[in-house]
Image: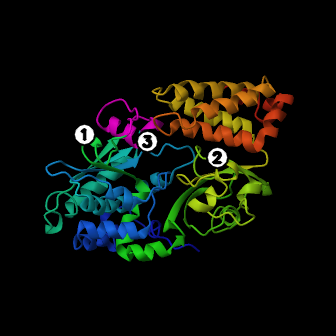
Amino acid sequence: MSKKLLLKNIDVEGIKTFEVFRKHGGYSAAEKAFKMTPDEILEEVKISGLRGRGGAGFPTGLKWSFLAKPEGVPRYLVVNADESEPGTFKDRYLMEYIPHQLIEGILISSFCLGANVSYIYIRGEYSWIPEILEYAIQEAKAHGFLGKNIKNTGYDLEIYVQRGAGAYVCGEETALLESLEGKRGNPRLKPPFPAVKGLYQCPTVVNNVETIAAIPAIISITGAEYAKMGVGRSTGTKLISACGNLNRPGVYEIDFNLSIEEFIYSEEYCGGIPKGKKLKACIPGGSSVPILPAKLLLKTANGETRLMNYESMADGGFITGTALGSGGFIVLDEDQCIVRHTMTLARFYNHESCGQCTPCREGTGWMYRILKKIEEGRGTYDDIDLLWNIQSKIDGNTICPLGDAASWPVAAAIRHFRDEFQWHINNPECLTKNYGIAEYATI
């Protein structure tokens, strides 16, 4: 059984409130942090090996160390709560059920970074959660953990919640900053990077909700103890959003030495696939990471067990590997249609493209229309090769990673399931047999 750091008190009645959170050790890490210097806190985060939990997996302490510190210029911490990756919902779980854990993480992180104003940028579809966060902020302020001269330390901090307008591209940190400034959420050209010129052209750190929520645990148990958990450079614990064809979908906190097979089939976690059906494929890190067939999920390219960590997932590169990403774990059973799922993802990325880059603006639409053509039984073998060519022209050729996120699912689907694409071309009745014309007509 994995040791819980983020969700250890999630089932405690009333943990959403300050009083109950405080009773169970809440804000004690902040009190400990206030007795440390910012450099000492930064060193603990570095030692912990904590990697960004939003998808990229970049070392958090290293990212913080890049923050410019010019005199007389404000610095900002921005929490990326624009959780829009299909299949990912673990940040919502934290904010909705244990909001003070995030608030405490922001407090410690902002103190370390020298930021006196922090923002939580939350996706617009989470319409009920800003009120939860704002209430928690007011509770923390009423008890002296936010506002002026926090706990007589001389340190001031205000936290503001900003609602997004439902744009997936604003999950990219520079597009998020543009939106936060009141502009259209288009990604910025880099450099300069946010650590030098971010929000309002001031030094800014942007981190995911889960990343910041892990900071109190690191300060409490020390970075060295945190680093002992996990495998190699995958330290600590990770939240996984499990969905799809599973008996027990939900949010789970896992150790990085857990195997994919155990995660899917053990009763402690997902409890297997409904009706005893076989595993066909899985998208283990949110919709943008490559899909893998069962034969590559349960074993690595070297014949070893594939684990739920950054290195094991990536084993084999994008040929036989994938990525842990944001932890959106989508399971597909033997009856699922890979072509239809790929088409659905392509439609999403086409809709969410900001249109700034030609390869993404045009290419995502082309991929969706070709996939729709194949799914409707009008495709040819040449369409498969055309899809492959288009995705290769998008990958790596856009300002932000949305283009990559759109191309990788298509590339992986063709790489591992080309025979299913060919089957669709030869068997146009698949649409009627598996889904029904009426259902498809609503897409």
Neighbours of disc 2 within 10 Å: few (<14), some (14-19), many (20+): many
Task: Determine if the magenta segment contains residue 186.
Answer: yes
Which residue corresponds to mark 3? 172
Q: Of helix, strand and loop, which one carries label 1?
A: helix
Amino acid of disc 3:
Glu
320 sits left or right of 72 in the view: right
Q: Position of residue 409 (x, y in %)?
A: 64, 41
Which residue corresponds to mark 1? 200
Which residue corresponds to mark 2? 290
Task: Determine if the magenta segment contains residue 292.
Answer: no
Amino acid of disc 2:
Pro
Q: Is 56 in front, or is 237?
A: 56
Residue 231 vertical placement versus 427 (above, below): below
Q: Position of residue 118 (x, y in %)?
A: 27, 51
Quarter-wise, where is residue 100 in the image? Answer: bottom left
319 sits left or right of 19 in the view: right
Q: Position of residue 370 (x, y in %)?
A: 69, 25
Q: Residue at x 22, y 53 (%)?
A: 69
Q: Which residues are magenta?
A: 164-190
104 sits left or right of 117 in the view: right
Q: CA distance from mark 1 to mark 3?
A: 17 Å
Q: CA distance from mark 2 to mark 3?
A: 19 Å
